[in-house]
Image (cartoon, rainbow, N blue to C red):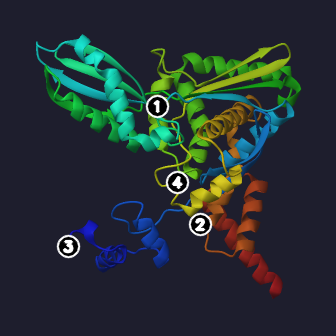
Amino acid sequence: MKFYELAPEQRRALLISQGIELNKIDDAVLRELDQLSENVVGELRFPVGVVQNVLVNGKKYLVPLATEEPSVVAAANHGAGIFAKSGGVSASSQRQGIYGQIILQVDKSFAEAQLTAAFPALIKQTNDEFASLVKHGGGVKKINLKQVNELVYLKVLVDPAEAMGANKVNSILEFMADKFINFPGITTKLFAILSNYPSQITTAEVKLAVANVGGMAIAKRIALLSEIGQTDPYRAVTNNKGIMNGVDGVLMATGNDTRAVEAACGVWANQSGQYSSFSKWSVKNEQLIGQLTLPLAIGTVGGSINSRPDVQESYRLLGGQITSQELANVIIAIGLANNLAALLAIATTGIQKGHMKLQAKNIVAALDATAAEKEQVRQKMIAEETYTQESAEIYLKEMRENNHASRN
C-alpha cells in the first residue's frame, strides 16, 4: 500500500521502524485529525490566548488568538484597552463576494458581444445548479469580460454567503467553464479557478485622546513613524508584520485561511506601486487617529470550521452566532490594536524590552525543571534583564545549588 493509503497508526509505526521518534498522541485524536488532512502522523498544537475588552461598533468581544508568541497577545490586550477608553473601534466590512477567473482561448470566429449576451442566462443556470448557496444569500452576481488577442479573461463575482467560499467558487467556475467550451469560437479552456486578489475589504478607525497614549509628543511620534512607513519599505514591512501577528492569530483560532489572507494583503500593500504600511496614524484636534484597511476573505462556516471542536470553542468565546462581516470587523480591530501597541513601544521604551520580558516564558519552557523552578528562573531573568537559554540554565543550576546548600 502507498503511504497515504495506510491508516494513521500504520504510518506512525512505519516511521518509528525507520528510527524516527514521534510524540505520543491519543488514538482518537489521531483518527480525528486524519479526517482533516493528508498523510497525517501527528499534531502541532498552538496555545489560544484571549484578548479582553475588544470594543467594536459599540459591542464588546472576547477574542481568541492562536499564537505561540506571548507578546502578540499582550500587545493586542494593551492596544484594545487603550481603544476602549476612547469609545472603541468603528469598523465596516464590504462583502460583495470573491472573484474567480475563467481563461479561454478563442479563434478569429469568436464574437465578444455574443458571449456577453449569454451571461444572464448562464448566471441563472448556475445559480439554479447551486441553489443551496443562493438559499443562504449567495450565488453568482456578475461576469466581466476582457479579450487580449486570442485570450478571453472572464472575471466572475460570487457571493459565498457566510463561507470563505474557495471550494464553492471553484465548483461554480468549473460548471460555468464547461458551458463556455461549446460556445462558437472558443477552442480551449485554460483554467477556471478562484482568485485571491483583494475583493472583500474591511476598514477600521479609532480616534484616541492623546492623553491615553501618553501625551501629544508621543502621539506625534507615532504619526511620524506611520508617515515613514508610507514611503520606506523597510519600516512598512515590519509594521505590516506586526499587524498580521494579530490578524493571523484570530484567523488561526477561527479556522480561516491565513495563506489566502496573507496573499491578498501582499497585493494590497503594493496597490499604489510602492510597498507601504497598511495602517495610517495622524494627529488632529487633540486626537490620535488610526486607520487600517485590509482584504479579509473569511468565513464562519465551511471548510473544517464546523468539524473542529477547538475552532468551535473559539466561536463560543466570540459569542456564538457571529457573522462573517462581524468577524472581519473584529479581526481588523485586533490588527489595529497590535499596531498601536507596537508603535507605542517604539515611540517610548523600545520594542525589545517588553518583548523579551514575555519571551522569557518560552525560554524557561525548554528547561528540564518543575513548574515552580521555571517560574523562579523566569523571575530571575526579568530581574537581571538577561534573556538567553544559557542564562536560564545557569540560574537553574545556581538555584538548585543554593537550595541544596540551605538544606545542609
In the image, is residue 350 above or below residue 280?
below
Sooner in the amino-acid sequence: mark 1 or mark 3: 3
Q: Residue furthest right?
A: 211
Sooner in the amino-acid sequence: mark 3 or mark 4: 3
Residue depth check, mark 1 versus mark 2: number of the one nearer the observer:
1
Residue at the image position 75 percent from the left and 55 percent from the top: 382
Q: Is residue 265 left or right of residue 335?
A: left
Which labelled disc corresponds to residue 264? 1
Q: Is residue 49 visible?
A: yes
Q: Position of residue 127 (x, y in %)?
A: 39, 35
- Crowding at mark 2 (Cα within 10 Å: few <14, some 14-19, many 20+): few
Q: CA distance from mark 2 to mark 4?
A: 32 Å
In the image, is residue 397 above or below residue 130?
below
Q: CA distance from mark 1 to mark 2?
A: 36 Å
- Crowding at mark 4 (Cα within 10 Å: few <14, some 14-19, many 20+): some
Q: What type is the residue that disc 1 sits on?
A: Ala
Label 2: element kind: loop
Q: Is residue 46 left or right of residue 190?
A: right
The residue under label 2 is: 366
Which labelled disc corresponds to residue 305? 4
Q: CA distance from mark 2 to mark 3?
A: 39 Å
Label 1: element kind: helix
The residue under label 3 is: 1
Q: Position of residue 319 (x, y in %)?
A: 71, 50
Sooner in the amino-acid sequence: mark 2 or mark 4: 4
